[in-house]
Amino acid sequence: MDDKINQLKQQFNTRLSEIQNTMDFDKVRVEFLGKKGSVTSLLKGMKDLSGDERKEFGKKVNELKQDIAQLIEDKSEELKRMEIEAEINSMPKYDITTPASLTRGSYHPITLVQRQCESIFKSMGFTVEDYAEVVTDYECFESVNIPKHHPARDMQDTYYLENGQLLKSQTSAAQNAILRKYGKNLKENGVPIKAIFPGRCFRNEATDATHENTFFQMEGVMVDKDISISNLIYFMKTMLSEVFRKDIKVRLRPGFFPFVEPGFELDINCLICGGEGCPSCGHSGWLELCPCGMIHPEVLKEGGIDPEEYTGFAFGLGLTRLAMMKYGVKDIRDLNSGNLKALSQFTDDDNE
Ligand code: FA5
């Protein structure tokens, strides 16, 4: 009978060494220790043995049973540990102390042109102002001579809040606040008002290659005694030649805005097609860039400044379109796309 026990031990050891995963243990356990398993069958043969032999054999079979159970337990634990280790090793390795990205970010092209314009105007004595994006109807329209139901409002439909406020459709919304802020210094100390105010504007309109519903403008105003159209043209020319650093064709034509008189449209020859006409300029060869004009007497009055004594100019530069032209972006919508791959290619040594 001892031979049978040793034979079974060997069989078990062979089966144990073949086990590849934890699922196989149950099979082997049933095979040897189950009701119809090999060890249980050995016990069935005991009936043919004498009393002492049966006792001795029973003891050995029980020991075998315990050994087998223990070996299965040990091997199963070992295999589980190995499976967990293998799973851990197969996972991607993260080191939380490693910086998130070793690649530096880059400025958005609109930020680059905005900064460039700011530094050009600052060097000419202008201050840079910040202004809200949510404004009142008064700020955006009425204070700049666009009363309720004026047809000029049709050109600038925007997004309205339930409380009657709106997302500003033009940076001209800040004109009145600027005139009031610096008017006292002008009147009491003779310091001219020279300010620019860049900002995000919103319009409820269909988008295309040159129109976005969210875009940037940069407003500029200068008010003093004897300010004329010549001053306006000088500042516009200086700004454009500094931004592009090359000769570019511009044209000035009459334009109507209720807050300037006279008013002009300043167009730039399309730098994408060289003026031949393309989708980026509406096939006209020209792009409306910077309307401007002499501030309307009513707007000066509304800002607390006497139009009999002072005159001034204002302009509303399309910053997003300027970025398009400067960086050769064919479709304005690319600038709001958030496509980092496309946007990160713009760098400018002047603005590093
Ligand atoms: C105005 O917004 C006036 N406030 C500008 C102004 C200021 C005139 C001061 C006179 C004195 P206009 O709607 O044309 O004007 O917009 C000015 C510029 O903003 C345009 O020439 C264009 O460059 C840019 N712009 C206007 N609408 C869009 C748009 N939907 N998408 C991108 N750029 C736009």
Image (cartoon, rainbow, N blue to C red):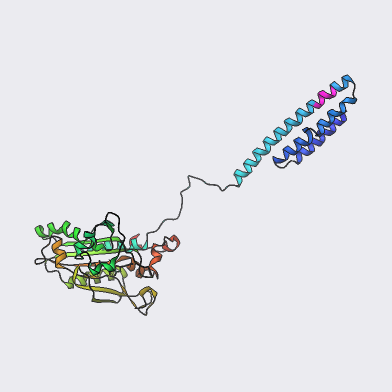
Question: Of 225 and 72, which appears nearest the observer?
Answer: 72
The percent position of residue 107, horizontal first and vertical second, equals 37, 59
In terms of image quarters, where does ligand 1 lie?
bottom left
Q: Secondary structure of the magenta portion, mostly?
A: helix
The C terminus: image quadrant: bottom left
The N terminus: image quadrant: top right
Q: In the image, what residue occupies the spot 82% across and 25% down?
A: 60
Image quadrant in which you'd find residue 75 = top right
- Give the side of residue 188 with respect to residue 176, left or right: left
Whether 308 is drawn above or below 101: the answer is: below
Instruction: Please indicate, yes or no, whether residue 59 appears anywhere in the rendered image.
Output: yes
Q: In the image, what residue occupies the spot 79% across and 32% down?
A: 35
Image quadrant in which you'd find residue 181 = bottom left
The percent position of residue 271, horizontal first and vertical second, equals 35, 74
Whether 310 is drawn above or below 28: the answer is: below
Question: Of 22 and 228, which appears nearest the observer?
Answer: 22
The percent position of residue 284, horizontal first and vertical second, equals 34, 78
Image quadrant in which you'd find residue 36 = top right
The segment highlighted magenta reads 56-61
* Residue furthest out toward the bottom: 276
